[in-house]
Image (cartoon, helix red, strand yellow):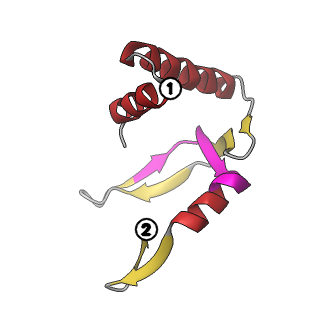
């Protein structure tokens, strides 16, 4: 589901105009972003926790040129799913092996 599909489903579910749903989504994402940029976590009980984390500097290889590059240390957003979300997925989805790889299926 992409952003526009999400907005359409939210509008339908809450009987909102697409414009109102878009404003709501923008406000929620903006608030999460603003809070993380203050180095504060966003804990949504039952859903999960967004948190800024530091990533160490690392040396990588560009797969196209095989050139070694240095990736500087940086801050990245992380998400840890909450118990409610994990349990819902465990009830709704299953893991199967297909062609030597693990896949998620209904």
Who comes first in sequence, dot 1 or dot 2? 1
Image quadrant occupied by the N terminus: top left
Q: Quadrant of residue 43?
A: top right
- Mark 1 is surrounded, within 10 Å at the Cα level, by few (under 14), some (14 to 19) or many (20 or more) other residues, namely few
Above or below — where is 46 with respect to 61? above
Query: With respect to residue 70, does 5 lie above or below?
Result: above
Measuring 60% from the left and 67% from the top, which residue is drawn there?
90
x%, y% of residue 79? 62, 46
Q: Position of residue 17 (x, y in %)?
A: 40, 16
The reply to whether discs 1 and 2 touch (Cβ–Cβ < 8 Å) is: no
Q: Number of numbered discs present?
A: 2
Residue at (57, 23) in percent of width and height: 28
Q: CA distance from mark 1 to mark 2?
A: 26 Å
Q: Indicate which label's residue lies in the foreground, 1 or 2.
A: 1
Q: Residue 76 magenta-drawn? A: yes
Residue 66 in view in this figure: yes
Determine the residue located farthest toward the bottom in the rendered image: 100
Among the 4 quarters of the image, the one containing residue 53? top right
> What span is in magenta?
69-85
What label does residue 14 carry, if any? 1
Q: Secondary structure at mark 1?
A: helix
Helix, strand or loop status at disc 2: loop
Mark identifier at residue 85: none
Q: Please identify the quadrant where the C terminus is shown.
A: bottom left
How many neighbours does mark 2 have within 10 angstroms: few (below 14), some (14-19), or many (20 or more)? few
User: x, y percentage for residue 48?
Assistant: 68, 45
Residue carrying label 2: 106
Q: Nearer the viewer, residue 45 or 88?
A: 88
* Residue at 44% from the left image edge and 80% from the top image edge: 96
Q: Is residue 16 left or right of residue 66?
A: right
For the question of whether residue 74 can be seen, the reply is no
């Amino acid at each position: 589901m992409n952003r526009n599909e999400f907005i359409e489903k939210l509008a339908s579910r809450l009987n909102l105009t697409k414009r109102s749903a878009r404003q709501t989504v923008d406000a929620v994402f903006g608030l999460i972003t603003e809070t993380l940029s203050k180095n504060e976590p966003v804990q949504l009980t039952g859903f999960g926790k967004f948190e800024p984390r530091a990533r160490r500097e690392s040396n990588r290889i560009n797969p196209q040129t095989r050139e070694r590059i240095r990736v500087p240390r940086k801050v990245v957003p992380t998400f840890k799913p909450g118990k409610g979300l994990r349990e819902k997925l465990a009830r709704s989805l299953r893991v199967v092996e297909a062609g030597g790889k693990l896949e998620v299926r209904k």
